[in-house]
Image (tube, grey):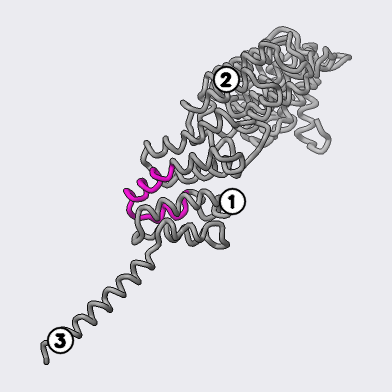
Amino acid sequence: MVTRSLGAKARVLIAVTTLILLVVAACKPTPGYLERWKNRPGSEDRFADYLKDPKVSHAVHVRALELLVEQWEYSSGIMRGGGPLNEMRDTGERDATIRDAIPEFRRLYESDDVLRVRVRDAVWNIREATENQEIRTGLEDILVDWFTNHWQPCVLVGGVSVSNLFAAVGRQRGEGFIVDKFENGDYNDIICTLQSVGGIEWLKDSDPVVNAFISRWDSGNLPDDAQRRVTLLDEVSGFATNPIMKTWMWSKMQDENEPALHRNIFADLIARHRTDDDFDRYAALLAMENNYRWMGVQGMIQMRNTDGIEAVLAQLPATGEYRYYDGNLRYDGFKRASNTVCGMQRISELGDNTRPVFEAHINDENPHSRALAIHCLARYGSNSSVQRLNAAKAAIPGDQMVPGWSQEGTTFHQLIDETIQAIVTPDAGN
């Protein structure tokens, strides 16, 4: 009786255990189970939970990721930067999940225009969750296809910027698309391309992109309207520091056949994107007997502060025409230009630090360097400067004229007296 009784209990225990195991097995999700939640409110959170759950099967991980991409309109916030993929501690399983989901990504990408953009944005985010280059390349292939077959520069779609997409595909795979737009696109394509790619880090090093832009400009195959061309130039900041681009801009700025409007925007671009080698180019402008001389002066000072002032005063030509100001020859052109230089914000910021530099040049044999130094001391001189100016005045013949200073003529004695008056009575002005 005891043996039979134990056997009955064992059979009951086995039956109960089997039932529990069946219930547990039924509770484990399958890919088919996930389909029930497709497109339901809140399903994205459920799929994200399954994706990062180490207890579910690989097939469930893959399907959860596929559904998150399919429902990107609602899951994009969850999946930013890879989202729950980053919480999968098993990196091997994470990479395998992404790899096995790529075929479904492609199917969704090719199914319709709306899903195509969502998949594009999704794979850009998902690639952040893996360091496996083979998998990243597989994801980037989708981005490359979008640039190849669907990119319209003036049509903004999706939530990931074009510059970020280009950063993902990299220079080797991406620069050809930009080159093609510069070579073959219409004016609007070029403008929109420039606006889209300005933030790409590798762009400034891409000689093919720069050469394509320069060739298109020089070909004349652009609108004749000068203002529209200025708009075009104003968008090249992404590669304005490229050495080829910089050399071209300098040559265009000094090309008298270029419209003045273009030359001015080239000058502005150079000023906004200075590099160390621009200093010598600015210094070369000092020999030009027009407005570009003073652009050179300002560029040198802005780049090297008091050392720039010293270089200007040491390198200004002793002879030549200095009356050119604001596009015309003026009887007081040199004085007007000197007012502009002495009033520069950079010199004002340097303040008293400029005084020793100017004082060192008030006895120069070069009349232009001497006059500029004396005139700037009206703003930055001190009592010690007054003593130096009086000593300089005693060494200069009373009839020696300051070239290009006034219609009636101004002697160095008069210029020194005006400067001393400005120093001792600052409210009197220059």
Q: Nearer the viewer, residue 282 or 101?
A: 101
The kind of secondary structure element at disc 2 is helix
- Nearer the N terminus, badge 3 or badge 2? 3
Q: Nearer the viewer, residue 306 or 390?
A: 306
Residue of label 2: 210
Q: Nearer the viewer, residue 78 or 310?
A: 78
Work out how far the residue at label 1 is from the one at label 2, CA to CA, in angstroms.
Answer: 37 Å
Left-right relation of 98 to 355? left
- Nearer the N terminus, badge 3 or badge 1? 3
Near mark 1 (Cα within 10 A), the count class, few <14, some 14-19 or many ≥20, is: some
Left-right relation of 95 to 10? right
Image coordinates for residue 89, horizontal then vertical, percent: 34, 55
Q: Quick one: quadrant of the N terminus?
A: bottom left
Residue of label 3: 6
Work out how far the residue at label 3 is from the one at label 1, CA to CA, in angstroms.
Answer: 60 Å
Work out how far the residue at label 3 is from the one at label 2, CA to CA, in angstroms.
Answer: 89 Å
Which quadrant of the figure has residue 328? top right
The kind of secondary structure element at disc 1 is helix
The answer to whether residue 220 shows anywhere in this view is yes
Question: Mark 3–mark 1 contact, CB under 8 Å?
Answer: no
Residue of label 1: 73
Left-right relation of 227 to 34? right
For badge 1, the amino acid type reads Glu
Mark carried by residue 115: none
- Nearer the N terminus, badge 1 or badge 2? 1
Magenta span dominant secondary structure: helix
Q: Quick one: quadrant of the C terminus?
A: top right
Image coordinates for residue 332, horizontal then vertical, percent: 83, 17
Which residues are the magenta region?
82-102
Taking 430 as reference, is 128 above or below it?
below
